[in-house]
Image (cartoon, rainbow, N blue to C red):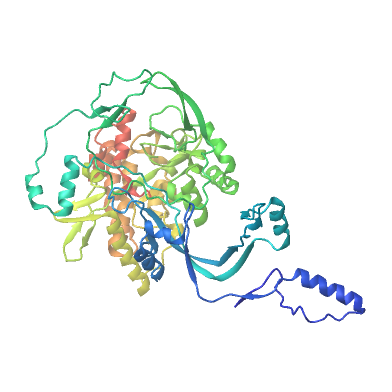
Amino acid sequence: MSASGPSSVPMDIDTPVETGEGQAGSSIMGALAASVAPFHTYPKQPFASIEYLGPVSHPSAILKIITQEDINTCLNSTEKTVEARSIDMRYKPGDLYAIPVKGLKVPSQKLLLKVVRKKRRPQERDTEHGARTTTSPSRKGKQREGTENGIFTAEVVGPLTQTIRFKSMGDWHYTPDQQGRTAQIIGAMRDLDYDAILEYSVPPLDETFVEPVSPSGQDGDDPMEGSSGTTQLYRSLLDLQALPVFSDRRVPLIWNYKNHTQAYVEDYEDKRTGETKQRYVNRARHVAYTIPIIGHNSKNVPKEPVKGLMDKLKKADQRIMEKMRNLLAERPVWLRHVLLRQFSEADRRVIILSKAYFPAFVYTFGAGPFWKCLVRYGYDPRHHVEARLYQRIYFYLNVTRIGPRGHAYHSPPPDDDDEEDGGKAKTGSNITTQAERKSQWEAQQERLIAEGKRPPFDPDQDYIFDGKILQRDVPDFQLCDITDPLIRKYIDDPALVGDKCAAHDGWYKPAAYALIKALTRIKFTHIRDNDEPAPDSICFQAIEDFEAAMLEGKSGEGGSRMADDDDDEEHEEEDEGDEDEEEDEGGEGGDDAGEE
């Protein structure tokens, strides 16, 4: 192995260079000889080095702070773990409270140079009396010697393949009182002194925590004595022991700490001293924007988003904003998951993570027939009769399923404990969550898809109810998304529309709204339990009850009788109430009703 000089092209200096003219060839040859360094070979024996941040008198002096055994173990280890590559540098080997400085072995690609300094011998001359004296060389001699051959020579000894570097911070050094009771019992436990451990007793409480120390170093002197202007010193009597490690953080390679761009210097008054001091204050904060929520009896609806949100939307995706604006212009009321289905998967992720697109365009109701529906700013569905098609209809299923061990469990109607139990339904000793029930239904549907008994899932149509097939196991729809012909007949019947938008039934008469909900529930349950389209014949009994109630002229009572048991418990209070009562009424539905 050889190391070349500035030129990487090997060349024999003694070989003449052929040129057109002999004189020109000699000049070129001389220039090359002066500019190209000769080749030198160095031994292949590798070396290792220890970097020490300080003056070094002799290489063997490192053995005073690092033992030869530790050096051999560290350099000969082939493991790549930090523990195997670490080494300790101890300035006080016998002091247990002196925490060593940590070093780390790293690979290196360097050359070890041996530098020799030539020393000029002193000159001797005879004096007038015949004695010989030595004189140091004059300054002129030093200058002359330096201009001739130099006083240093360098020789490559070999490659440096390993280097031990100390980049860790030196730890705090705290030496407690060795005569203290705590230090003595620690020493007894370390030395396994059985008698000293048995004789130890907890000392009585002493609330004297410090004692004065005179400047001369004598303890117990009067603090008032001494020259004027001398600062009184104190010594702690807490007898605290040093921690095993105070700080073992490694210094980063590039230390370029800078304060946050929003950090400003602020003046404040110290309450203890009354002085005016300065501190850094971070003025940057994340402002969260949420969808505005109003009650069903609120007089006005929001017409535009807050001002701060408009500044944030300047950096938003304008393509997504334009599409959402067009969707809300075409249909002013949406369920959240239905509106998200109108976007691609990538756009849905942007909308959900940003949390600023929905508050920029819509508000929502906290109760009533449009509970949790996203409504376009400025549009009030309570004042437009055509908004009845956007009413939300949801219900709860009482489903019986067989568990893994053959036990039957049910999905009861929601009660006050569902929300506290984290959405868990309890029946006896069996506890199942909605996620578990949903996964079981999906597993069953996947088996039917594999057997060819039903078409695959269509996520883009999971909010449509056609009375034939289910795309998801959540009965939560808007009336405009129900396409079953039998149910559609009553939804579009103008004779079933009331005069105003009520808090419970919306724009429909109570009996009509109960019928629409009952028909949807009957068909949904039949499809879910039997995995087949629901025939109209299973709904005839509900239709007969509705017609009988209409003939009797008791629409309110008929609607109450046709409502489900869970709806009776949910809406016992009057339709007209304060906003807080309606919010509680709408909250009975919970997130299990179908909100994703």
Residue 402 in which image quadrant:
bottom left
Q: Is residue 104 above or below residue 553?
A: below
The residue lying furthest to the front in this view is 129
Of residues 387 and 47, the one drawn nearer to the viewer in this rendering: 47
Task: Specify whether residue 301 is in view.
Answer: yes
**Rendered residue at 77%/69% (across/down):** 34
Q: How many marks?
A: 0
Q: Is residue 491 left or right of residue 320?
A: left
Q: Is residue 65 visible?
A: no
Query: At 62% from the left edge and 55% from the top edge, which residue is drawn?
Result: 131
Horizontal side, residue 203 vs residue 88: left or right: left
Closer to us: 77 or 569: 77
Query: In the rendering, at what x and y percent does residue 180 appear?
Result: 19, 39
Give residue 563's position: percent from left, percent from top. Answer: 26, 44
x and y percentages locating residue 308 in the rendered image: 53, 33
Could you say which is closer to the camera, residue 565 or residue 596? 596
Say which quadrant the N terminus sits in: bottom right
Q: Nearer the viewer, residue 198 or 273?
A: 198
The residue at 53%/43% (across/down) is 328
- Across and down, in percent, residue 506 comes to 38, 37
Above or below for 557 versus 593? above
